[in-house]
Amino acid sequence: MRAELIDGKAIAASVRADVARDVAGLRERGVVPGLTVVLVGDDMASATYVGAKEKASREAGMAGGTIRLPADTTQDALLSLITQLNGDAAVHGILVQMPLPKHIDPDTVIRHIRPDKDVDGFHPENVGKLLIGHTDGFVSCTPAGVIEMLLRSGVETRGAEVVVVGRSNIVGKPMAALLVQARAGGDATVTICHSRTKDLASHTRRADILIVAAGRAEMITGDMIKPGAVVIDVGMNSVPDATRAKGSRLCGDVHFASAAEVASRITPVPGGVGPMTIAMLLRNTVRAAERTVS
Ligand code: GUN
């Protein structure tokens, strides 16, 4: 293996230590940052993610917890709960775990969350603020985590050719918006590729920094990567593997073994971007709490 690993777990631990210090400072001023996570239904992966968010917020000294609702909860009941949380001064951050059951419209739910408590950064007001460069909103945690990771690893984005594979509202689009901002962690020349892109490899091979968030297991192979590129793998896929006791294994959107022979630096899956997402959620929640006192 040629590439050096970018250790998301270690970088996330240092962000979380900063957050814990900020939480302690707020507590001294009589404010306990509170994060409430809402989980509707019993999707196994969502339950795991939510458990990790709850544990991390507790470890950072925050208040709050998870409200678990049955899969047949009506949209009106969920909106009523959000109204109540919107008005609760002890709740600084609200996160409704996605995906929601099919009978609930996620856009209606996201729009119902008070923008100043939307620590996921999904509300249109926060997405708009990101696009016009206002820093008083909240930025979606995964792309914010990728930028933080690049900054803390000393990867220069200014003037770099960055290719983002994936155009989701949660990762691809906000990722590109952050990378083009005129500030640290930005100033890049950005290309967004997606499922309709012609000749994907011709784009990815030009990237100094390649960020992959397409949701397709191991779709980027070493031959699609420019020698010496920095590769950030946002994917998290479970694929069948008969050699494992569980019958499956976790992998990213990048074929790690071949990519690591070509790249200069690469994030592993797991232990790369995933831990950063949670760290940025905690940071957003602290910021939400700080804004209520200053
Ligand atoms: N489901 C998968 N990732 C996320 C996330 O970052 N936020 C929420 N609310 N749901 C998710």
Image: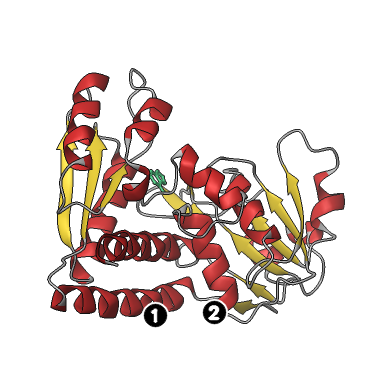
The one nearer the camera, 91 or 151, is 91
Q: Residue at x 76, y 33 (%)?
A: 196
Query: Can see residue 74?
Result: no
**Marks 1 & 2, CB-CB < 8 Å contact:** yes
Applied colour scheme: secondary structure
The one nearer the camera, 16 or 262, is 16
**Residue located farthest toward the left when viewing the structure as drawn:** 30
Q: Amino acid at mark 1?
A: Ser
How far apart marks 1 and 2 lie (CA) works out to: 10 Å
Q: Amino acid at mark 2?
A: Arg
Within 10 angstroms of label 1, few (less than 14), some, or many (20 or more) residues? some
Q: What quarter of the picture does the N terminus occupy? A: bottom right
The one nearer the camera, 232 or 132, is 132
Q: Position of residue 142 (x, y in %)?
A: 49, 56
Q: What quarter of the picture does the C terminus occupy? A: bottom left
- Element class at badge 1: helix
Q: Residue at x 61, y 47 (%)?
A: 172
The residue singled out by tag 2 in the image is: 152
Query: Can see residue 78?
Result: yes
Within 10 angstroms of label 2, few (less than 14), some, or many (20 or more) residues? some
Q: Position of residue 228 (x, y in %)?
A: 78, 75
The residue singled out by tag 1 in the image is: 14
Q: Is residue 221 left or right of residue 203?
A: left
Q: Quadrant of residue 73?
A: top left
Q: Is residue 122 above or below residue 272?
A: above
Q: Is residue 22 above or below residue 48?
A: below
- Please tell me which of labels 1 and 2 falls first in the chain: 1
- Element class at badge 2: helix
- The answer as to whether callout 2 falls within 8 Å of ligand 1 is no
